[in-house]
Image (cartoon, rainbow, N blue to C red):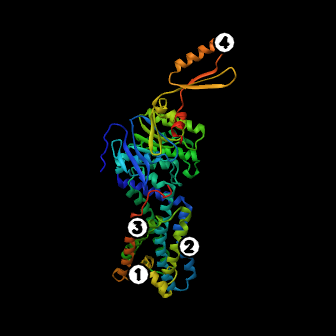
Amino acid sequence: MIARVTSDAAIEVRGLRKRYGDVDAVSGIDFTVQRGEIFGLLGPNGAGKTTTVEVLEGYRERTAGEVAVLGHDPGRRERALRERVGIVLQSSGMYRHVSVREALVHWSGLYPHPRDVDEVIELAGLGEKADARTRQLSGGQLRRLDFALALVGDPELIFLDEPTTGFDPAARRTAWETIRSLKALGKTVLLTTHYLDEAQELADRVAIIKNGAIIAEGAPSELGVGGEVRYRVAYRSGSGETTAQETDDPTTVLYELTRAALDRGERLEELSVTRPSLEDVYLELTADE
Amino acid sequence: MSDATLLWHQYRLERRMFWRNPSAAFFNFLLPLLFLALFGAIFSANQANLDVIVPGIAGMAVMATTFSALAFNMTFLREQGILKRIRGTPLPGTIYFGGIALSAVTNTVIQIAVITISGKLFFGIAWPQRWFELAVFVAAGVVCFASLGVALSHVIPNFESAPAYVNAIFLPVIFISGVFYDAASAPSFLLDIAQILPLKHLIDGLSGAMVTGVGLTDNLGSLAVIGVWAALGIVLAVRGFSWESHRS
């Protein structure tokens, strides 16, 4: 019997393991999602993101570990927990012969304190399609319906499994606005994505998961390889070549560089100091040796 | 919202979706009535044949509205991920499937009513002599064929192949079980097979209730066969149940 974690956090995961046959899809991970935070779970396909999220959503039974979602064990599938959670699955179909509004009215009836249906329709950007049958919606509109169905019960915690896959850039921006508005309402969001800009844009903290294990965790801006924060200093030399070097002490490097250049009477064209983007960190971490 | 209200809402939604889906409405609804009209016209000069065809079509209607409809529906809902989506909501599974089952039963009841009224108005058959027996056999048939339909959906690999799986069972069974002729006049090996299956026994029971006036006590054997299949169907429907298609 696995003990339940009791905690004030929205999600508490300790030593979570999920085994399929003799393969560990998730091999003992720990993380905590605080209330009111957007937490990103990043990783390549097959890393164990969806398995992890589906354990937390109550779809999969875990092999080992302790898990608490809003203080409940999701494996027990209590109705009281499902009333407080909204789920956007990676892909799931919908009834074809109902309108958007009918679907949302029906869904809102499943929850004790639903949001106003018309408000949710507007929030999801489905105002013009409110009376259209769902089978007439485009892929992007169906995804917005997924959002709307997950939000209509006014959940405290929302799971978003690759919510913007297949969106055009404008639609992604709109979806990001919606997700930020959830945070503004004090909701907790667990977001899985393989879009790094999405994680960087939205998440307060991210965990990078690879081969079923978490290999880095922290705020997107603070994530570094091996724990140290590195800077990249680059410039174009007189001969036209771009030179770059990495450092954890950009002040000294800049001073040396600029003094040497001034001594030579040169200008350092295109001088820049950048911190590694989440993408750089991610690619370095998830690269197969 | 109380569970009874939730069930009512689910039921109403299922009914609305049913009528908006032309192919479901046709196969579940018009096809048995079309068969009744056609065979009724063909046999119109022969009352003995009409006495067979009316309860036969009634039995077929029970099977079509429960077994075939639920095998299709469950396969579709599972493959589309609708079951998985529902499972993530607070709606209890029993209420959700209760709504689906009630909707199927509604189709059965409407069909039996239309067939009974047509029998009286057009095919020279009196009102059913035994309403109680009619209700008992329809109820037993619904439970039996609904559970077998759900059980069948567990082995159907995808929605495209659902018609093949369903009709590979449905069509031979309705032919050998005496929907269109008196099963007793079929070759004995076919009759032997039909005797093992539930549909012939359902038709025997319906025939007793609607035409010949044979009571429940004389049809207990038929009820028992339906009951055994119902028990088997329920076990298979529950034990093999999955909320998600296996490919995911």
Name the residue nearer the viewer: B32 or B175: B175
- List the residue tagged with mark 2: B34
Have a look at marks 2 and 4 and say if they share a chain.
no
Q: Label 4 neighbourhood size at 10 Å, few (<14), some (14-19), many (20+)? A: few
Q: Secondary structure at mark 4?
A: loop
Q: CA distance from mark 3 to mark 2?
A: 32 Å
- List the residue tagged with mark 3: B236
Q: Label 1 neighbourhood size at 10 Å, few (<14), some (14-19), many (20+)? A: many
Q: Please identify, in this view, whether the residue under mark 2 or under mark 4 is nearer the observer.
A: 4
* Residue type, mark 4 in image: Gly
Q: Secondary structure at mark 1?
A: helix
Q: CA distance from mark 1 to mark 2?
A: 23 Å
Of the two numbered discs 3 and 2 on the same chain, state the one appearing first in sequence.
Answer: 2
Position of residue A1 in the picture relative to residue B166 (left or right): left
Have a look at marks 1 and 3 and say if they share a chain.
yes
Residue at position x 59%, y 22% in the image: A272
- List the residue tagged with mark 1: B208
Q: Is residue B12 visible?
A: yes
Q: Chain of mark 2?
A: B
- List the residue tagged with mark 4: A265
* Residue type, mark 1 in image: Gly
